[in-house]
Amino acid sequence: MAREFDDASSEDLSTTTLAITGLPFTCQCWFKLHDHSGAGKTILSMGDMTAANDYWTIFVPTSGILRFRTRSGGSGGNADTSNEVTDGTWHHAHVHFYANGNTECVLDGTVGSKGTNASQSYPSSQTQFRIGSRTTSGTKFYMDGEVAEVMMSGSYVGSARASLGVNALMH
């Protein structure tokens, strides 16, 4: 079952009970955006609610790609996909943060595209996990769409394994 979020109403879900507290980790979910125009629409995020630049987030910027961004004290980077998200269509997001600091972002398994980025900064403090908005003391970048079947693991769940279910559902 999906949970709908309305960016005009500043809706999100949050918890301070954190399932993941270190590296490596994998996070996956299904999502559907109603409208990705405007500032980046946040799907999932974890970080420090008292700091503006200490978080990781999965979001869709105005360019329409899927992005996995990490920040710690203002430093970090992005792993971007090359394929774009289509509004009104269900998509599968899969991100992985390796123990060595490399990151991976996959859109729709082998059907979509994969972006990687090396040696990223893991947030030094994580006090909250959010669905539908960014975990930061700054701008929240609320989502306008739906999220379903969020999965987090403190180990590596490979994109090839994750794409088996994605490909079965998409074909």
Image (cartoon, rainbow, N blue to C red):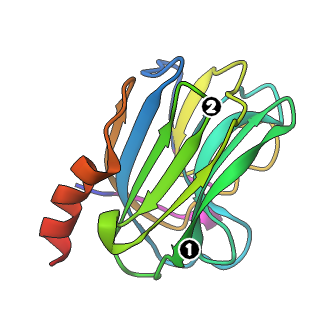
Residue at screen point 59% across, 27% down: 100
Tell which of 126 and 131 is nearer to you: 126
- Across and down, in percent, residue 121 comes to 72, 31
The structure residue drawn at horizontal position 72% and vertical position 75%, both measured from the top left corner, is: 38
Task: Verify CB contact (< 8 Å) between mark 1 and mark 2.
Answer: no
Mark nearer the N terminus (1 vs 2): 1
- How far across and how far down the image is residue 28, in percent? 37, 47
37 displayed left or right of 131:
right
Residue beneath the point at 82% across and 28% down? 51
Does residue 129 appear in the picture of this structure? yes
Q: CA distance from mark 1 to mark 2?
A: 21 Å
Q: Is residue 4 magenta?
A: yes
Q: Compared with residue 112, is residue 29 higher up or lower down, i.e. above or below? A: above
**Amino acid residing under circle 1:** Ser
Judge the density around disc 1: few (<14), some (14-19), many (≥20) Cα neighbours within 10 Å. Answer: some
Q: Quadrant of the C terminus?
A: bottom left
Which image quadrant: the N terminus?
Answer: bottom left
Judge from the rendering whether residue 57 lies leftward or rightward of residue 106; answer left or right: right
Q: Secondary structure at mark 2?
A: loop
What amino acid is at disc 2? Gly
36 versus 68 height, above or below: below
Instruction: State the residue position of label 2.
Output: 101
Point 75% across, 37% down: residue: 71
Secondary structure beneath dot 1 equals strand
Decide: few, some or many residues near mark 2? Use Cα within 10 Å; few <14, some 14-19, many ≥20: some
Report the span colored magenta: 3-12
In the displayed structure, does residue 13 sit left or right of residue 8?
left
- Percent across and percent down for residue 154 are 39, 23
Q: Which residue is mark 1?
A: 82
Q: Which image quadrant is residue 67 in?
A: bottom right
